[in-house]
């Protein structure tokens, strides 16, 4: 297999989707000549499983749930008229609410128009909105977005510091479950910040959450401005085309109808039964090839576009939370996964690309090329050469340099970054994850490992409460062995040490 493929191989394998303005070049992946024919039955099964999922079967068996994110941009495909109506009505409500905010029909208390947006959420309730905001935002944003996506007090203080005046800020608290502690803490900290400023948080707050959740109950009790639904058949990591992503984007001034249309077109393109014309099926096959179907090699995302910086972060959750599973659908222990990392080119060229070319060969790359450099004319940094030409040169140069050393890569090319393209990229990778999960026979739609960490964290907080109570009764006790013994948890001595050390530093 040659690593610098000829024009013929490029032409034979190139997937062009004119409706999306998207090309997928897989010619630099080292799949053998009979790869497609040997994998065809498996891909057919994966496409059939996807069609069943889209028809509304219980596609997430562990949680006994349907998986319906594709209906969000094609409501007519939802399995019941009631769902179709609910999806459509939610988009209409988002557009109507946004219009009222933008027009000043709804103002902050005191009649000031809203100018800022604080999104409080984590995981799937933050990564999608952050990616969309960064990819499509700019100086003309109608509301400037800020995010609280952690329970780090200093991180929150920094955001409040950047925001300044809260009187013109609309807060959106997003949590599907409505009980995620980091988000609850962010909301409580925001409410306290509002209070310090003499403002009433509930007059400026909106909730996006499941009906009847803790957050929903609170928003009703306090009379928040609005509540938008988060349905159990939409997973957090595939929720960006639900109210989770649409409301913040619309408020920022992003054309969410175009974003939904892009996703819808990509969904149509990735239902294609001819594998060679289906970019999601091809990418799933390349993940199989690149990682040997068991996460043997990592997926390095290299978008040559600053606006796509957060794409790899977004994909980390989408792919790793979906694919990283202990067991397959038959209950066999498989320890599956596909590690994703990357930032942007050519910046990464000056960081870790050295290792990619010369070091351990444990990855394959997805380059993303954006044909349009910027909206206006470009300066010539050298006669006849622009900064964008250099970006293009570095992409193709790096790809060539990697290929010369036998490093595999794919290249996704899109015409421009706009709402439709971002919607299309989101949908393309969602479908790729679903198809790949079928190919390796795992449930892509649950996350049992995350729950384990949350439970363990709860136990840490409980132990800290006991240590503090013990210290209140026994001031001056600082020996972790003695404290752990007194609390009857000698096996937790190391954790008691960590708690004592932290309390000591905090004074
Ligand atoms: O939206 P929430 O219910 O607050 O959940 C936020 C996040 O929580 C967990 O970490 C899950 O593993 C994620 O998939 C989810 O996106």
Image (spheres, helix red, strand yellow):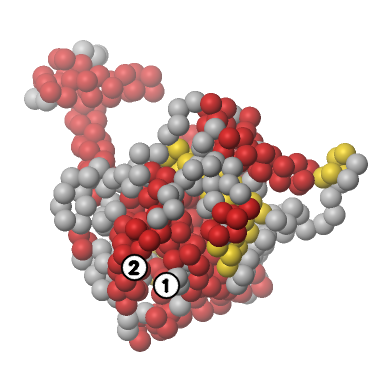
Which of the 4 image quarters holds residue 390? top right
Would you say the residues marked 1 and 2 are in contact, meaning their CB atoms lie under 8 Å apart?
yes
Q: Residue 408 in the image: x percent, y percent?
A: 50, 42
Q: Residue at x 34, y 58 (%)?
A: 38
Foreground: 178 or 66? Answer: 66
Q: Quadrant of the C terminus?
A: top left
* Residue bearing the label numbered 2: 44
Q: Residue at x 21, y 63 (%)?
A: 61
Residues packed near mark 2 inside 10 Å, few (<14), some (14 to 19) or many (20 plus)? some
Q: Left or right? Give the position of 487 relative to 345.
A: left
Element marked by disc 1:
loop
Which of the 4 image quarters holds residue 106? bottom right
Residues packed near mark 1 inside 10 Å, few (<14), some (14 to 19) or many (20 plus)? some
Q: Residue at x 54, y 46 (%)?
A: 28
Q: Left or right? Give the position of 382 relative to 357.
A: right
Q: Left or right? Give the position of 21 relative to 427.
A: right
Q: Who comes first in sequence, dot 1 or dot 2?
A: 2
* Residue bearing the label numbered 1: 273
Visible residue check, residue 484: yes
Residue 229 disc label = none
Element marked by disc 2:
helix
Q: Residue at x 22, y 45 (%)?
A: 334
Disc 1: residue Cβ within 8 A of ligand 1's nearest atom: no
Q: Left or right? Give the position of 111 relative to 295.
A: right
Foreground: 272 or 418? Answer: 272
Q: Residue 18 in the image: x percent, y percent?
A: 62, 70
Foreground: 183 or 421? Answer: 421
Q: Residue 288 in the image: x percent, y percent?
A: 38, 50
């Amino acid at each position: 297999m040659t690593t610098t493929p000829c024009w013929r191989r490029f032409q034979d394998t190139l997937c062009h989707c004119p409706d999306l303005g998207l090309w997928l070049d897989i010619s630099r992946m080292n799949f053998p000549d009979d790869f497609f024919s040997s994998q065809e039955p498996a891909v057919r099964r994966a496409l059939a499983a996807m069609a069943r999922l889209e028809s509304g079967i219980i596609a997430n068996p562990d949680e006994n749930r349907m998986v319906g994110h594709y209906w969000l941009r094609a409501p007519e495909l939802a399995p019941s008229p009631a769902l179709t109506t609910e999806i459509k009505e939610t988009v209409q409500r988002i557009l109507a609410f946004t219009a009222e905010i933008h027009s000043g029909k709804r103002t902050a208390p005191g009649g000031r128009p809203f100018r800022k947006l604080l999104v409080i959420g984590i995981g799937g309730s933050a990564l999608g909105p952050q990616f969309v905001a960064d990819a499509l935002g700019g100086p003309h944003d109608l509301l400037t977005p800020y995010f609280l996506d952690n329970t780090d007090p200093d991180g929150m203080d920094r955001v409040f510091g950047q925001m300044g005046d809260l009187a013109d800020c609309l807060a959106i608290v997003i949590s599907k479950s409505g009980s995620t502690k980091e988000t609850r803490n962010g909301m409580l900290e925001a409410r306290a910040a509002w209070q310090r400023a003499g403002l009433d948080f509930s007059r400026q707050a909106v909730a996006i959450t499941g009906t009847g959740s803790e957050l929903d109950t609170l928003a009703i009790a306090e009379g928040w401005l609005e509540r938008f639904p988060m349905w159990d058949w939409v997973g957090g990591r595939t929720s960006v085309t639900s109210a989770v992503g649409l409301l913040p984007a619309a408020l920022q001034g992003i054309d969410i109808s175009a974003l939904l249309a892009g996703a819808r077109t990509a969904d149509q393109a990735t239902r294609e039964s001819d594998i060679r014309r289906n970019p999601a099926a091809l990418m799933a096959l390349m993940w199989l090839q690149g990682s040997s179907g068991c996460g043997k090699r990592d997926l390095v995302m290299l978008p040559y576009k600053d606006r796509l910086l957060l794409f790899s972060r977004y994909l980390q959750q989408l792919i790793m939370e979906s694919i990283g599973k202990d067991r397959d659908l038959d209950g066999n222990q498989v320890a599956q996964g596909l590690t994703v990392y990357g930032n942007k080119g050519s910046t990464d060229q000056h960081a870790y690309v050295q290792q990619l070319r010369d070091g351990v060969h444990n990855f394959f790359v997805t380059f993303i090329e954006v044909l349009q450099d910027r909206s206006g004319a470009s300066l010539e940094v050298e006669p006849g050469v622009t900064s964008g030409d250099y970006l293009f040169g570095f992409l193709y140069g790096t790809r060539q340099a990697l290929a010369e050393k036998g490093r595999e890569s794919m290249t996704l090319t899109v015409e421009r970054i706009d709402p439709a393209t971002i919607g299309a990229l989101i949908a393309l990778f969602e479908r790729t994850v679903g198809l790949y999960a079928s190919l390796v026979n795992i449930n892509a739609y649950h996350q049992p490992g995350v729950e384990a960490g949350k439970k363990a964290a709860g136990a840490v907080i409980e132990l800290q409460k006991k240590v503090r109570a013990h210290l209140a009764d026994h001031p001056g006790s600082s020996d972790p062995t003695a404290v752990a013994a007194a609390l009857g948890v000698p096996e937790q001595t190391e954790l008691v040490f960590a708690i004592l050390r932290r309390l000591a530093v905090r004074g």
